[in-house]
Amino acid sequence: MTGQSDLTALFRANFELCEVGPGQTIAVLTEGDLLPDYRAASLSALSQLGAEVVDVNVASDDAKDASHRIANLGENPLTHNPESMQQCLDADMVVDHMLLLFSHEQVAMQKAGTRVLLIVEPVEILERLFPSAELRYRVEAGEKKFEAAKTLRFTNELGSDVTYRLDGKDILTEYGYTTKPGRWDHWPGGFLASLAAKNGVDGRVVMAPRDIVFPLKCYVEEPIEFIIEGGWVKEINGGKQAAELKQFMEAYDDPRANAVSHIGWGLNEKCVWDPELPGIGMDGRAHYGNVLFSLGPDTEFGGDNDTACHLDLPMANCNLWLDDDLIVEAGEVVAAEMRP
């Protein structure tokens, strides 16, 4: 078990990668009595590094943990707390123990030049997937290729064949720490993703048994087919699990849940392919060589779809091309500059 002093040391090591030091104002954002040990460790570690630390604890009688928020993106108590929001906007960096992902508040912070680091995963995940400069190098190598590409296509043996027409949308890189103003990251990380052009996705995606469904945190048990036209899922076909997935999406009562969102691939070789691990599922999302197919919101990438329904669907054993450049083959990264 990690004691409080060990947790503080672990957080300090990450904040050193973030280049935190004197002259910087860092806001530590928490909700109610959730993650009190993370709050204490962040406050202590940041103070040790000489930063001016602002403790932004938003009172809540109905605090929602990260597992709830990842299934209901955009919901957060900052919406009704302008003072707390302003403290975050005024900071050089926000340490997010609340999970602001895909929220208008996070977008506003980034536009204000505030960098944001999300830390909500269990300690054992944070330790095992601690970031490195080497991982950053490989993720940024992928970013350069992504930026230059006009199309992304991926296939698998079950008949997936889908093409994304790219037009310079923001590329999200995750390697577990952040040094650049206005940049968001998530510890742990290890993947990159972007959006297609408006209405720019067409084809067929067939998830295979032992692919993963987040936020439901389960393996696919039988093939699930998605028919995509003009950037929208028009059909979801399959057996019982496909029907349950449709019901899950319909429960949000928002047709924008059927919009194709980001696409990318994982580069973290330390990740384990197991949806039942504790936490919100970063092992699956960042797993080395997976193709991360996603539906729902896109505000993290500069889009305007803020639906609360977000499906991340990591797929194994796929082939992925940027233009004619093969990046992933049968679930293995083949681009040399992205390999460990």
Image: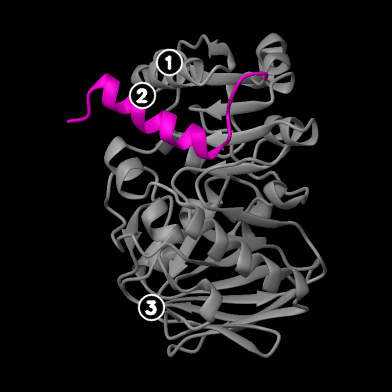
Q: Position of residue 163 (x, y in %)?
A: 67, 81
Magenta span: predominant SS is helix
> Residue type at mark 2?
Thr
Q: Residues within 10 Å of mark 3 (few under 14, many from 20)?
A: many
What residue is disc 3 on?
208
Q: Is residue 38 above or below residue 60?
A: below
Determine the secondary structure under disc 2: helix
Give left or right: position of 180 versus 51.
Answer: right
> Residue type at mark 3?
Ala
What residue is disc 1 on?
44
Give left or right: position of 211 versus 162.
Answer: left
Give the mark, 1 or 3, whose residue is nearer the N terminus: 1
Asked whether residue 196 is in view, the answer is yes
- Label 2 to label 3: alpha-carbon separation: 41 Å
- Residue at horizontal 77 percent and vertical 50 percent from the top: 302
Q: Is residue 121 above or below residue 168?
A: above
Q: Are the residues at dot 2 and dot 1 in contact (C-beta closer than 8 Å)?
A: yes
What residue is disc 2 on?
8
Q: Nearer the viewer, residue 142 or 200?
A: 142
Give left or right: position of 36 versus 50.
Answer: left
